[in-house]
Amino acid sequence: MSQQEAVDLAIKHASFTPCKQDICRQVRYLNQGIPVTGYWGVVLAPSVDAQGRPSRTESFLVNATTGDVTRKS
């Protein structure tokens, strides 16, 4: 699964539409567990505040093999 596919899946599970700025869509590849499983960690924000920081973020783990999405609190 590509990085963009993971972001698209996370957006489908978010309670809002993230803003268009790059800072509102952050993504990192993570290896977790034994045996190791690859995940895309995706953080989304609907807007940025006056200081340019993302506001009210939601975080997701997207399994890079299966596409399963888990929302993290």
Image (cartoon, rainbow, N blue to C red):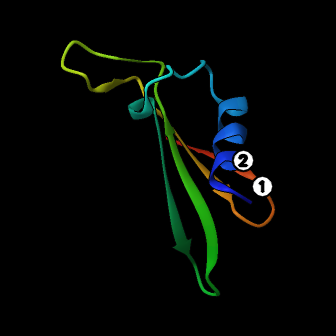
**How far apart are the alpha carbons under marks 1 and 2?**
9 Å
Secondary structure state at the residue bearing disc 2: helix
Q: Quadrant of residue 48?
A: top left
Report the side of 61 relative to 50 (left or right): right
Q: Nearer the viewer, residue 33 or 17?
A: 17
Q: Which residue is mark 1?
A: 67
Residue 37's disc is: none
Question: What residue sits 38% from the left and 33% below the top?
Answer: 23
Residue 73: horizontal and vertical position, in percent? 49, 41
| Vertical placement of residue 31 versus 16, above or below | below
Q: Nearer the viewer, residue 53 or 21?
A: 21
Question: What residue sits 43% from the left and 33% below the top?
Answer: 22
| Vertical placement of residue 24 versus 63, above or below | above
Residue 59: horizontal and vertical position, in percent? 51, 41
Question: How many marks can you see?
Answer: 2
Q: Which residue is mark 2?
A: 5
Question: Residue flagged by tag 1: what amino acid is it?
Answer: Gly
Secondary structure state at the residue bearing disc 1: loop
Q: Nearer the viewer, mark 1 or mark 2?
A: 2
The N terminus: image quadrant: bottom right
Question: Residue flagged by tag 2: what amino acid is it?
Answer: Glu
Q: Are marks 1 and 2 in contact (CB under 8 Å)?
A: yes
| Vertical placement of residue 14 versus 61, above or below | above
Question: What residue sits 40% from the left and 23% below the top?
Answer: 56
Report the side of 28 relative to 3 (left or right): left
